[in-house]
Amino acid sequence: MKNLQQAEPIPAQAREAIEKMLQTGDLFRYTAKENAPVTLLEQEFAEMMGSRFALAVASCSAALFLTLKALDLKPNAKVIIPGFTFAAVPSAVVHANCQPVLVEVGDDFRMDMADFAAKLTDDIGAVLISHMRGHTSDMDVILRLCAAKGIPVIEDAAHSLGTTWNGQKIGTMGVVGCFSFQSYKLVNGGEGGILVTDDEDIIAKAVIMSGAYENNWQKHGCDTDCFAKYQNTLPLYNTRMNNLSATVIRPQLAEVPRRAANGLRNHEHLAARLNSHPNLTVPPALKPEHRAPDSIQFLLEDMSEPQARALMASSASLGLPLQIFGLHTENARVFWNWKFIKDLPELPQTRAMLMRACDLRLPASLSLADVDQIADALLACVNQVVQAKAA
Ligand SMILES: *Cc1c(COP(=O)(O)O)cnc(C)c1O
């Protein structure tokens, strides 16, 4: 069985550029007068996304936090997030002195639009839509409802690089889109994040707060007068990206189409095989959505909790790191573990989904033969567990 935690090698161009950088020691993004690797990454990423501006930072979480700060929301403003996402998302909201409002997530891993509409009251300051595991919630409905109320939409596209919605790139539909370069995402910088926006006021504030102290904002090459007026008026968080990370990331941007296509091919192949089993369901994508998955999520049908636990154990013994979100006590993706939220609500629908939702990494580097091997192993484990019940 292939090791599903294994990353792809970093492209050779990165190694040459890093060797040069190690000679000069020029690792800080603002040392060079121009063309620092971080600046070049921002230009290349903005161009790839068709956005006016990009800002590279230390993580997607930092990008989300800076975005919330740059929106100048009222203290304690309510920010809608899905009830199924990574703990970093409500964390960014809390750190930005806002209050997360959790919305139910359905069995298709996407935000429940009825609950969203009900919770989108006039006192909501922003909507932070997290496309968890690359599953896109209904952006047509979200954007329409938010536009009608003048509420800004931020996209947490950490896991959605390469995904499109009606042909438009995910991360470019809201006022800001945030991406991650952490190692488990499509582009691997070890750590790192980037935000894209067309709004010059937001980019100016985010750049300054990310740590562009003194006149360093001038090195962003954004032709806008906005920056000067924010200099020394906003607190610095110093959550910049360094040149080493940018150098590892840049040559991987060209790999995005291949990784996205392979990921989708692998996902669809495994989904078809798992869907052929009566005890497994892989929910389909929404119609406008073209995905770039690097993992698969599926639901257990008519299986008890002991059976679900037995399935995790038997797949682990075959080298498959299968997790069921809700059965893992420490899981940072289940809302009941976000104990830093005041008055944490109950979300019965989301909880029920998480108790039977399986999560398995599916790196783009896998071949279809690898995927078949995974499918054979998983289906054998499910059969074993289900038949044990019948016996
Ligand atoms: C990984 C991830 C994050 C956090 O990204 P970092 O770069 O590690 O801060 C946020 N949201 C989602 C959906 C993610 O998958």
Image (cartoon, helix red, strand yellow):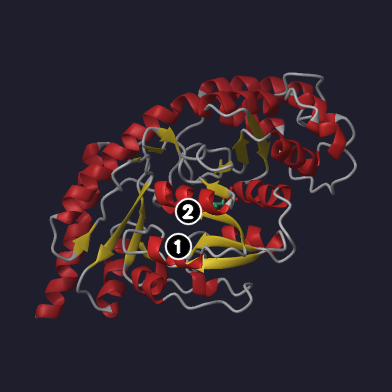
Q: Position of residue 28 (x, y in %)?
A: 78, 32
Q: SS for tag 1?
A: helix
Pointer 2 with pointer 1, Cβ within 8 A? yes
Q: 199 above or below 301?
A: above
Q: Which mark is residue 117?
A: 1
Q: Which residue is mark 2?
A: 145
Question: In the displayed structure, does residue 343 sit left or right of residue 35?
Answer: left
Question: In the displayed structure, does residue 295 sit left or right of residue 223?
Answer: left
Q: Give the residue at x 53% y 73%.
A: 337
Question: In the displayed structure, does residue 262 sit left or right of residue 150?
Answer: left
**Taking the image as drawn, is residue 191 in sight?**
yes
Q: Which mark is residue 375?
A: none
Q: Nearer the viewer, residue 259 or 123?
A: 123
Q: Position of residue 184 (x, y in %)?
A: 49, 46
Q: Nearer the viewer, residue 387 or 153?
A: 153
Q: Quadrant of residue 113?
A: bottom left
Q: SS for tag 2?
A: helix
**Taking the image as drawn, is residue 25 in sight?**
no
Quarter that holds the C terminus: bottom left
Is the residue at mark 1 in contact range of ligand 1, meaning its CB lies under 8 Å from it? Answer: no
Residue type (three-letter) at the residue carrying disc 1: Ala
Q: 46 above or below 344?
A: above
Q: CA distance from mark 2 to mark 1?
A: 7 Å
Q: Give the residue at x 58% y 58%.
A: 89
Q: Position of residue 114 (x, y in %)?
A: 39, 64
Q: 304 above or below 369?
A: below
Q: Give the residue at x 52% y 22%.
A: 12
Q: Residues within 10 Å of mark 1 (few under 14, many from 20)?
A: some
Q: Nearer the viewer, residue 93 or 229?
A: 229
Q: Give the residue at x 81% y 33%.
A: 227
